[in-house]
Amino acid sequence: MPADQYTAFLTDIENRGIQTPLEITQAGIMIDGHQRLRAAIDLNHDTVPTVVVSPEDEVEYMLLAALRRRQLSASQRAALAVDLDQLHERRLQARERSRANLRRGEQSPEEATLPPRHGKSRDHAARLAGVSPRTLQDALTVRDADPALFERVKNGEIAVHLASRRVKRARRDTTLPPAPALPTGRFQVIYADPPWQLGNPDGPYAPENHYLTLPLADIIDLNPPTTDDAVLYLWAVNCLLPEALQVMATWGFTYKTNYSWDKLSISLGIWNRQQHELLLVGRKGNCPPPDSEDRSPSVVRAKRGRHSEKPGEFYEIIERAYPGASKLELFARGPARPGWITWGNEAEEAA
């Protein structure tokens, strides 16, 4: 019970006493009423009211009693329902084994009266817990993949949908191949879309829900191979603009200008409603700017695609500005464009 609720609970028992008896078995084992007993001890009560119960299954009895607790969150109820479902499954499996033994003539005739199996109990457990099937499935996912995290859900430390998201993310990340070594050679043009970390990997809109992200230090350490005179096109997340400029400077480039991608639709945001993304341009050495006839407008209007996918217009801008230059795309996904070398754990072989 959360501390604030327990304080109110304790005050009520101090004023009115324990109104609902603690439930114990014939052997004197308490199976419901731990918070009432805790309050009685804290208030120095000499005795507590009890009632003797004889449930067919004490574990099931305790789980069902816990599901009725008003202070439990939906996540906690889902976790308890998963425990209850597991209990039912084990019971059904035991009955199946008993029936199999009966058919082989290894059991006594009295056990032939075992109740028939009624199929999966999961939907019933979800209804008992008052949660949706999806919430129950999240709890099952966490229990099967990470028992320690499942205990945190039961303790109310983390919501089950966040825990499930962590499990699925970890499962996905383990299937990704490691990033290959950077290509050999030196490149005149670098085009990079780093997988920035925004600081809330459990959020519903976090990039971690879509791909593996990297800490800032790992992005900085990449330091792509370039010629002495080179140009960098670096995608920046608006809230991490200083970090993007830091990456650019550490890679040896001096900031010059930027392009703005107008996504033609309003997205989420804290200080404003995001509609654009910046592509920073930096220079190393004496790399010349594009010829005047090859310079593109600074605003590109194009609809957004799948998460983090950038419009093809930006490839065309770079190719028009530096048609004969050697080009390397970092953190690329999918097949490379003709004339480009790509790098990343989701990049396909260069064209």
Image: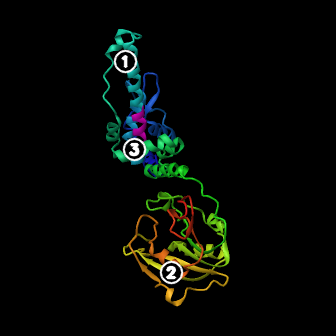
Q: Position of residue 156 (x, y in %)?
A: 47, 48
Marking on residue 99:
1
Residue range of the region highlighted in magenta in the rendering = 76-86
Q: Nearer the viewer, residue 322 or 235?
A: 322
Amino acid bearing label 3:
Gln
Whether residue 277 is visible to the viewer of this picture, yes or no, is no
Disc 1 and disc 2 in contact, CB within 8 angstroms: no
Marking on residue 137:
3
SS at mark 3?
helix
The answer to whether 113 is drawn above or below residue 214 in the figure is above
Furthest toward the right, the residue is 228
The residue wearing badge 2 is: 320
The answer to whether 289 is drawn above or below residue 179 in the figure is below
Amino acid bearing label 2:
Arg
Residue 321 magenta-highlighted: no
Q: Position of residue 216 (x, y in %)?
A: 61, 66
Q: Magenta span: helix, strand or loop, mainly?
A: helix
Residue at the image position 56 percent from the left and 58 percent from the top: 345
Q: How many marks?
A: 3
Residue at the image position 46 percent from the left and 66 percent from the top: 308
Residues at marks 1 and 2, CA–CA distance in whole angstroms? 76 Å
